[in-house]
Image: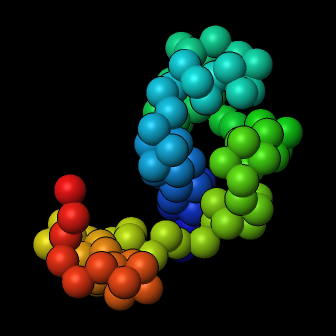
Amino acid sequence: MTVTEKYEALIKRIRSERKARKLSQKDAAEILGIKQPNYSKIESGAFKIRVEQLIALSIAFDMEVADFFKPSELDNITLTDKVRVLEKRVDLLEKVCGYDEYVE
């Protein structure tokens, strides 16, 4: 994997983690103390993220900086497979919590 490919994977992971936490680009920009258009340029690759910014995001996302460089378990799988993984997690949670069927 080239440096460019690794950087693109890093940015993809940052975007994925931001979205998983239901944060907007504006929210992420506020975490970094920058304006939303500048944050957007980080995610688009027009601006490079600084180490200090990566650390700030890791703190806000409650994860280690190194985790940004590890593939997410849901990366590179189809939507159908993602649904299956999530269904298995729900089934496990239902068993752990003692639910026999879905309760609304």
Q: Residue furthest left?
A: 80
Residue 43 location (% of width, % of height)? 51, 35
> Position of 64 compared to 39: left or right?
right
Name the residue: 78% across, 47% down. Answer: 59
Residue 32 seen in render: yes
User: In front here: 87 or 44?
Assistant: 87
Residue 77 location (% of width, % of height)? 28, 74
Name the residue: 67% across, 66% down. Answer: 67
> Position of 40 compared to 65: left or right?
left
User: In front here: 34 or 84?
Assistant: 84
Quarter of the image where the C terminus is located? bottom left
- Label count reads 0
Residue 85 seen in render: no
Residue 54 location (% of width, % of height)? 75, 45
Task: Note whether 92 is above or below 18 in the view shown.
Answer: below
Name the residue: 49% across, 70% down. Answer: 72
> Position of 49 compared to 99: left or right?
right
| Res. 102 image quadrant | bottom left
